[in-house]
Amino acid sequence: MKKAFTLVEAIITIVIIGILSAGTFVALKHLYLRAAKAKAFSELSSDSQVIADQIASLLYYRVPSSVIGYKGDGSFGSIYNMETSYQILEWIGSASEGLKAGYYSGFVDLNASDKTTQTITSYDINTTALDTLMADKFDGGSTDDLALIFAGSFDDGALSLASDFNSSFGWHAHNHNLLYTLQSLHTNSITLDASPDIIYEKYYLVDSAYAIARGADIDLNATCIRNLNQSIDNNTLFLFYNYRPWKNQTFCADPHGGSTQDGNVTILSSYVTGFQTGLINGNIKFDVTLTKKIRGSEHNVTISKQKVVF
């Protein structure tokens, strides 16, 4: 007589197998989610550190008193006197590569300079090397794009000279009363376009403005953004450069009119759900928050990175 499973035994066996399979599936799902979250956390941690380092490196060569917060509706204010919340960070950068290479000194001979003739005496200026440097850095730029800002007392003292900060550096179709465009650049002198009220012993040659902004705060339909041919959204963080407020220019995806949109743009990162900036002990502080959604999970992975630039 052959032994066999009864129908009840077979059903019980199938039920047990189903329960074990369901438990295994749940365990594997949790294992997958744990691995996915760990990977996302590692990637976001690395990305946020890279972003913070890149921004800090660019800000290191800023003209301190030129840094502003901008809303995208045309309103802006000095970050050193910020009383409201701004979504976009902008600043004017010095021609630091030329300074480090010794193509200009950044110092003025006060005795030999003359306000009447608008002439600043500064020795050992390599105009040819500066012109080549500008062409390489900005793909066709030249010394005609340069401007001069006096450092003032302790680098931000010039700010106290401005009765109207909005008209100090040319931001967003305003005047540039503390920034001088160059009529000519010579081996031992710089001729300015206007006579300065005060000549300081230190100056910056500036070559470009910079802006940091999320997609949520700019014009994502701007030509320069579309030409990137990459997947972008409100959480994409952009770096804008190669535009000059002293030439009535603004960054190429500025949602507000009033200035000529110009310059270049590059993507710093995706998944950036927050970017904030402010001051701490007189130094610029910014926070970058990155968030990534994990498929199959109800919770996202979020990481924030904070950095202070002296």
Image (spheres, rainbow, N blue to C red):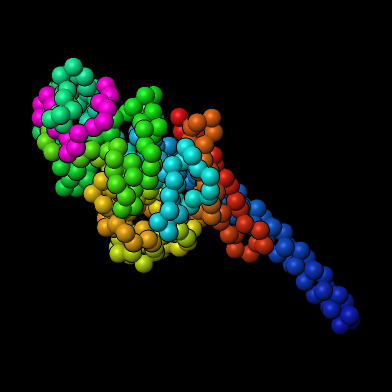
Residue 127: in magenta span: no
At horizontal 43% and vertical 53% (from top left) the residue drawn is 75
* The C terminus, quarter of image: top left
Q: Classify 182 as above or below 44.
A: above
Left or right? Give the position of 257 relative to 8.
left
Number of marks = 0
Toward the viewer: 158 or 289? 158
At horizontal 18% and vertical 17% (from top left) the residue drawn is 111
Left or right? Give the position of 100 relative to 128.
right
Can I make out residue 97 in this image?
no
At horizontal 49% and vertical 39% (from top left) the residue drawn is 81
Which image quadrant is residue 67 in?
A: top left
Left or right? Give the position of 186 relative to 72.
left
Q: Classify 7 as above or below 93.
A: below
* The N terminus, quarter of image: bottom right
Toward the viewer: 62 or 29? 62
Residue 187: in magenta span: yes
x, y (%) of residue 246?
Answer: 26, 46
Q: Which segment did they paint magenta?
A: 186-204
Which image quadrant is residue 8 in?
A: bottom right
x, y (%) of residue 56?
Answer: 43, 37
Can I make out residue 140 in this image?
yes
x, y (%) of residue 5?
Answer: 86, 78
Toward the viewer: 26 or 90? 90
Please, which residue is most extreme toward the top here?
111
At horizontal 44% and vertical 42% (from top left) the residue drawn is 78
> Which secondary structure is most common in the magenta stretch?
loop
